[in-house]
Image (cartoon, helix red, strand yellow):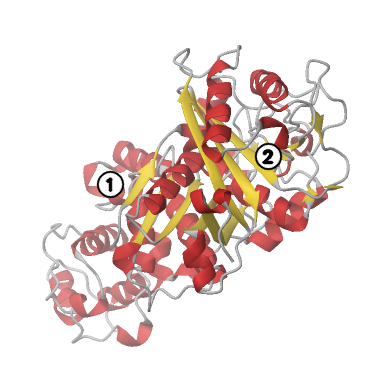
């Protein structure tokens, strides 16, 4: 698991209350009951934890966890 | 059985939810209030401030009670109210899965909104810049959101709103709820109040205006309503929610009411921003209006759960009005000696305690009342609870802004 993947999964479960078993690469945020406000909150948390700068509107309801990891990794965070 | 005239014009309290420093449900809160021991303690979150103690709900775990999402998406004043609302609905024996939600209203008193949210996000803005401010700041901080979130939680699709009459807010909410039921707009109303503002800026603001007790060497002795040595109130958090229904509806489904809300009155001092009119004329008008609304003679009142904040000004002014209007007969208590002053929640919490006093035929003692202020000439219960057969209780509330409100409750 990459650092990005680990951090994302950790934030989803511990900060946003998503059940751990639902945190799989193919899961889209809309299926995790995360609305647009929750996604901005998640973006803030990721930016702070990983010292990156994802834009506020990057994560959408249809974005998957796997796609998010790719977006983060493209900013230079590697395992 | 035909409804009595009093019952006919009133509404039944069929469910009660109390989340207070005295206990996180109605039974626990009542048991603590009956001991007459203060719950005020030093508060680590207020460390270093001029007043560093409060009455906080012990061990409140929002994640465990409401789920992890509610724990971070809702400010604590909303969390407390949802828990109290759920308790009240369960206590009333109602099932939100089966009721007609379009006929259910939610009226919640609140004063300061999400002060923890505002203070935390402001700190983030100053320290880390705009990008660090949560997009949930507004929906967490707005006072009205508590009514919205309670409505979401229980599926209440009738009118929902927040009443803001400062420390009278909970009382105002119950009065308004009664009108919605009597006017036919709703069949069930969840009414009450909530506050959680034990945060550095809010507490410092209260301290700077001279409202709070400064008894930092002995917090447990600080809230002492009607006592000669009182020096201010102790800030508290909490929520009280009541399920209200028309008596005939309650009877039809076999509910057992705690009591009936049979009268409501409100008025404004139009005198000063924060100080009560020392003549007590405004409070007197609210109290007399509530009695007239109930059709009850002043000398029929058995018990008063007073506003009794423990401030020098309130308690003497209030006691004079009680004496003037009700005489010397009623057994008066201020449960704020135990609970502290939960601001907008106070009226709802205290209406709940007044209903429990009627149900159990006993008046809880006022904590820390060891020497009655010689200026005060009413029968304040202190030391031990006093048993009495009681038919009629009054709950009074006064708020910054000169808001006065009073409820009359009748035994079920």
From the image, tell me which residue sits under label 2: B305
Please give the name of the residue rendered at 18% of the width and 63% of the height, measured from the top-left corner. Answer: A36
Residues B150 and B377: in front is B377
Question: Helix, strand, or loop for circle 1?
Answer: helix
Q: Does the residue at mark 2 contact the one at mark 1 (Cβ under 8 Å)?
A: no
* Quadrant hosting residue B187: bottom left
Q: In the rendered image, which quarter contains the C terminus of chain B?
A: bottom right
Residue B124 is left or right of residue B326, and the answer is left
The percent position of residue B379, horizontal first and vertical second, equals 82, 31
Q: Nearer the viewer, residue B46 or B17?
A: B17
Chain of the residue that carries numbered disc 2 in the rendered image: B
Q: Nearer the viewer, mark 2 or mark 1?
A: 2
For disc 1, the marked residue is: B138
Q: Residues within 10 Å of mark 2 (few under 14, many from 20)?
A: many
Identify which residue, B361 or B380, lies in the foreground: B361
| B293 shown above or below B138 | above
Compared across the picture, whether A79 is left or right of B196 comes to: left
Considering only vertical position in the picture, is A47 above or below A77?
A: above
């Amino acid at each position: 698991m990459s650092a990005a993947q680990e951090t994302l999964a950790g934030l989803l479960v511990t900060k946003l209350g998503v059940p751990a078993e639902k945190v799989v690469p193919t899961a889209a945020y809309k299926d995790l009951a995360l609305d647009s406000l929750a996604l901005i909150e998640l973006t803030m948390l990721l930016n702070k934890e990983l010292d990156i700068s994802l834009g506020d509107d990057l994560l959408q309801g249809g974005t998957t966890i796997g796609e998010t990891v790719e977006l983060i990794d493209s900013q230079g965070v590697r395992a | 059985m035909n409804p009595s005239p009093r019952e006919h014009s009133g509404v039944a309290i069929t469910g009660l939810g109390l989340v207070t420093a005295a206990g996180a449900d109605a039974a626990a809160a009542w048991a603590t209030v009956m001991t007459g021991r203060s719950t005020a303690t030093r508060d680590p979150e207020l460390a270093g401030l001029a007043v560093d103690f409060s009455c906080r709900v012990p061990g409140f775990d929002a994640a465990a009670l409401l789920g992890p999402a509610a724990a971070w998406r809702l400010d604590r004043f909303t969390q407390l109210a949802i828990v109290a609302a759920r308790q009240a609905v369960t206590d009333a024996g109602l099932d939100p899965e089966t009721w007609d939600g379009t006929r259910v209203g939610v009226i919640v008193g609140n004063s300061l909104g999400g002060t923890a949210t505002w203070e935390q996000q402001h700190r983030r803005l100053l320290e880390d810049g705009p990008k660090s401010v949560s997009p949930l700041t507004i929906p967490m901080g707005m006072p009205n959101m508590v009514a919205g979130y309670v409505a979401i939680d229980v599926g209440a699709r009738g009118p929902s709103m927040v009443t803001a009459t400062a420390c009278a807010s909970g009382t105002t909410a119950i009065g308004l709820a009664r009108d919605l039921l009597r006017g036919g707009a709703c069949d069930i109303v969840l009414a009450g109040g909530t506050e959680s503002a034990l945060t550095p800026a809010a507490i410092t603001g209260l301290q700077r205006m001279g409202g709070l007790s400064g008894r930092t060497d002995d917090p447990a002795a600080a809230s002492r309503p009607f006592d000669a040595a009182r020096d201010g109130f102790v800030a508290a958090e909490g929520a009280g929610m009541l399920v209200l229904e028309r008596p005939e509806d309650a009877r039809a489904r076999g509910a057992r009411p705690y009591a009936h809300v049979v009268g409501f009155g409100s008025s404004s001092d139009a005198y000063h921003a924060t100080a009560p009119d020392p003549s007590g004329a405004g409070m007197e008008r609210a109290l007399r209006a509530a009695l007239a609304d109930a059709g009850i003679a002043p000398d029929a009142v058995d018990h008063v759960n007073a506003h009794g904040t423990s401030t020098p000004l309130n308690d003497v002014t209030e006691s004079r009005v009680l004496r003037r209007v009700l005489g010397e007969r009623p057994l008066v208590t201020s449960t704020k000696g135990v609970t502290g002053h939960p601001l907008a929640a106070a009226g709802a919490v205290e209406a709940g305690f007044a209903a429990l006093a009627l149900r159990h035929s006993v008046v809880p003692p006022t904590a820390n009342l060891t020497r009655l202020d010689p200026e005060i000439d009413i029968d304040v219960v202190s030391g031990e609870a006093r048993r009495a057969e009681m038919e009629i209780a009054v709950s009074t509330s006064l708020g910054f802004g000169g808001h006065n409100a009073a409820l009359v409750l009748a035994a079920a």
